[in-house]
Image: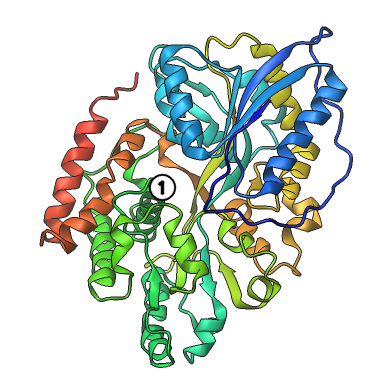
Amino acid sequence: MVTMSRRSAMAASLGFAATSVLSRPYIANAAATTATVWQVQGFFPEEDAAFRKVVADYEKASGNKIDYSIMPFMALNQKSVSALTSGDVPDLIFHDAPETILPQFAWNDTLLDVSDVVDVQKSKLSPTALDCASYYNSVKKARSFYLCPIKQACEPFHIWGDLVEKAGFKLSDAPKTWDAFWDFFKPMQKPLRDKGMRKIYALGLQVTTVGPNDGNNLFAAFMIANGGKDIVTKDGKLHTDDPKIREAMIKSITWMAAAYTGGFVPPEALSWNDADDNNAFHEKLFVIDFDGTLSTELAMFKDKKAYLEEMVTMGLPNGNDGKPVPALVGTGGGFIPKGSKNAEVAKEYMKYFMQPEVMNANLKEGLGRWVPAIPSIVKDDPFWLDPKDPHRPPYVQEAVLGPTIPSYNAFNPAWGQVQAEQLWTQSVADIVKNGMTAQAATDKAFKRAEAIFAKFTFG
């Protein structure tokens, strides 16, 4: 077994909580067999320890062996793409954000259908998790399950509540609609600077053209809040020809560009990577951030004053039309490449992992950074909605109990290419740096998106 280097950006060491004994696994074969597993590294040591415990429990009960390697997110991405392209593959890849690579390889028929695994828990899984696990296969000309979902996550708001008060405001006064909610924090910048915080900004707006994920997720949230939720629909179609979608795009990039040029966003935000906004938030360089999972808060779990008294987690306000908006959700789990030498053991392992009690224990031991893909778990286990934790309940409410929609990658692999090219936040940069109008920047981005989507034809 090999453990590769941890992410330097998230090296916090947090307390570990033991949980109840896990259930016995689903066992199909009597003979002991070894399966190779590539596992994404957690943000925290507790997540890796929780994974190792699942492996140990499964091995003890089944007699099978899991030969695993734990590697950082980007390393796993690169190695997975290389393996799936060459055919020299492990038996299972477990990924926090498989939508970054899985849609294209499902399209190319290089993954095993795992419907038989998903079917065991299908009635319990959230509809959004099921959507995130289902992809179109262009060879078979059909959609099927290629991901065994374990966990799901979304983007909540992370706020320094103590800075809101220091600026002379009350968070309870924050408006309930999208643009107005963001605008509420802008006037805090001046009084905080007047009080000596000369380098502080109001907004941690990830208008990055480098990415890989944060700018894309931010844009999607703005689009949904502006009525552009159906830019891609479940049939895989892109709707850039819809006037409503175009209007949502123009409104979204206009607001983001104005926030940047207005001086409310750190100037280096155009080139942030996914860790930069987290680090800047921890250094109190801005008041509010919008970023995925509870990693922002959990990185400061040992600082009880910051975690329990100063930081605030909030879900989504309503859209600009005053109506509730769904959270865009990504789902993590395991998938099996074609060419796997021990696919049956990989499937057994995932059937075991997907049992509600195993799923729940694993994610609790991982400090609740991800929520279970089975909604009944968070309703039945007091851990998930415990009011003593100021962050987990609002996050759980947004990620699994409130309205959600799947990442658009689940609908068409073309969305992954659009994201890789950073088309949407590049439109903001076109306004900020290149002097383009929002209309011209929209037309440019839509033209390129249409060319990418034209390469993917659904039967």
Residue found at x 29% / y 71%: 259
Between 183 and 405, the one lying in front of the other is: 183
Whether residue 290 can be seen here: no
Image quarter for residue 351? top right
Residue found at x 30% / y 63%: 268
Tell me residue 50's x, y (percent).
74, 41
In this rendering, the answer to whether 106 lies above or below 193 is: above
Q: Which residue is mark 1?
A: 213
The C terminus lies in which quarter of the figure? Answer: top left
Tell me residue 364's x, y (percent).
74, 49
Tell me residue 454's x, y (percent).
23, 28
Report the side of 396 relative to 403 (left or right): right
Residue found at x 30% / y 55%: 271
Image quarter for residue 112? top right
Color style of the picture: rainbow
Tell me residue 57's x, y (percent).
83, 30
Report the side of 100 relative to 348 (left or right): left
Residue found at x 66% / y 11%: 342
| Residues packed near mark 1 inside 10 Å, few (<14), some (14 to 19) or many (20 plus) | many
Report the side of 454 relative to 419 (left or right): left
